[in-house]
Amino acid sequence: MTATTLVHPVVQLAGLAEADKITKAGNTQLLIAAVIGIAVVVLLITWAKLHPFLGLMIGTAAMGVVAAVAPEDILASFVKGFGNTSGSVGLLIALGAMIGKLLTDSGGAEAIVDRIVGSVGKNKLPWAMALIAAIIGIPLFFEIGVVLLVPVVILVARKFDVSLMKVGIPALAGLSVLHGFIPPHPGPLAAIANLNADVGLVLLFGLIVAVPTLIIAGPLLARFIDVWVPVHAHGAPGGGWAGGVADTTGTDSDAPRLTKRAGFGAAIFCITLPVLLMLARTIAELTLDKTNGVRSFFTWLGEPAIALLLAVLVAMWLLGLGSGMKKQQVEKTVGGALPGIAGIMLIVAAGGGFKQMLVDAGVGNVIGDMAKSAGISALVLGWLVAVGIRLATGSATVATITAAGIVAPLSTSLDQTHLALLVLAIGAGSLFFSHVNDAGFWLVKEYFGLTVGQTIKSWSVMETVISVVGLACVLVLNLVV
């Protein structure tokens, strides 16, 4: 089949011949350079409190200097990786953010919550909250999803008189699982680009891995966490929200005035449209001949950028105009999605520059050769590297990008199926044990009114379970595909 990639075929993202290396440094020096580069990034982010974008830039320079790379080559390598990643991943992040903003501003998210919660009984609330978070989490970034769903969680807990953890953990698990495994979230997209993986297969396998992981780390785990952290909604400040779905559009004067709320069906259709188009492409490529016109059409239609662009246009019509917004209001909502993701896009692109230095200097090849000689599975290696960087930096996105760059040379010997599984293994590792250096940790703590200890026993444990169960599912899937 033809790989559905997020980069142009001429862009080589993994592995260099010895003659193409931009340094003559030996293997030991290259390994030291990699360690120092990663250490600089970690220290600048965690100790110096520098923005990850700047930390990755400086870390790239430090790695290049230790690896004896010429200053002009360091800059050229970083710019190349930055441009390739921003051109492929940044476009998709922007389009995904637009869909998410339309979903929230039009009331589509509220429609999904009301329909699902209103149709279940008290005992099924944890499952309903997991489902809501998984659906809404497809186009939304994690932080936005938390802000949107926490007031809903608190209201549901109060209305049905259930503990906060019983409904809160499933909701958080739904958001986190989507964030780690499913495009168009930044981490999976960056790993797909860095490893030149097939986005359709990652999406297909990601959904297969996500379902059991969400069930175990969501509704089932919530029963135990509810015993460890017995918190009730009346004791949680809920981030200061008095009720209803959180307003993520800014001040009240900035929010569009709706004459009606977007419908449940329209919201679901707009969220799942890009996913369905990308899956249709993968199915067409697996079942139809290369010369088949239908396959060519779905190959084009299922390109991530095309699929997301179509979804944005449909959402502008169904969610924007469909909820009574004027054209100017729809344009303002779509444009308003971009400022909030600027930092994410810069971090992802800078991570691409850091990765490119690993590749161009030959660091990745050295690590890949060592892993092969030691007999370490590429999937386990990707998970372990992502775990280490996640624990050090607190950022799932930085962990995913850096780990993908380090294990990229192994990708040259893997087919598209196993490349997709490698992306998911790295994604699982990037979620391991969120703690005090992770912004998500403090976001959950404050919104749910928890102590640090309670946050560790609930949120941190949940993240670790997602990571371990996710890897287990990837390894099981590796045995059957």
Image (cartoon, rainbow, N blue to C red):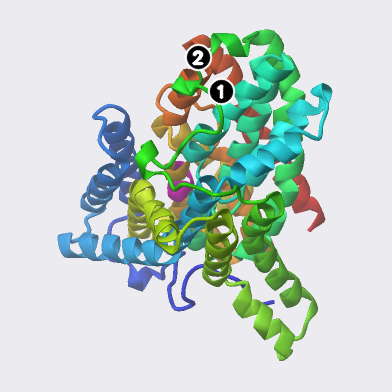
The picture places residue 159, in percent across and down from the top left corner, at 69, 19
Q: Which residues are magenta?
A: 399-403
Under circle 1, the secondary element is helix
Q: Give the quarter of the image for residue 26.
A: bottom left
- Judging by the rendered image, the residue that carries numbered circle 2 is 449
Q: Is residue 206 in the magenta section?
A: no
Residue at 22 percent of width and 51 percent of height: 61
Under circle 2, the secondary element is loop
Label annotation for residue 410 = none
Q: Is residue 412 visible?
A: yes
Q: Nearer the viewer, residue 343 or 159?
A: 159
Residue at 23 percent of width and 29 percent of height: 48
Q: Nearer the viewer, residue 308 or 105?
A: 105
Question: What's the amino acid at mark 1?
Answer: Ser
Q: Is residue 23 visible?
A: no
Residue 402 vertical placement versus 121 (above, below)? below
Q: Give the quarter of the image for residue 467.
A: top right
Residue 213 vertical placement versus 415 (above, below)? above
For the stretch drawn in magenta, the main secondary structure is helix
Direction left: furthest residue? 71
- The mark nearer the N terminus, 2 or 1, is 2
Residue 418 vertical placement versus 38 (above, below)? below
- Judging by the rendered image, the residue that carries numbered circle 1 is 460
Question: What's the amino acid at mark 2?
Answer: Gly
The reply to whether discs 2 and 1 touch (Cβ–Cβ < 8 Å) is no
The picture places residue 456, in percent across and down from the top left corner, at 54, 17
Split into 4 quadrants, where in the image is the N terminus? bottom right
Q: Left or right of 128: which side holds 411?
A: left
The picture places residue 42, in percent across and down from the top left corner, at 33, 35
The picture places residue 473, in percent across and down from the top left corner, at 74, 43
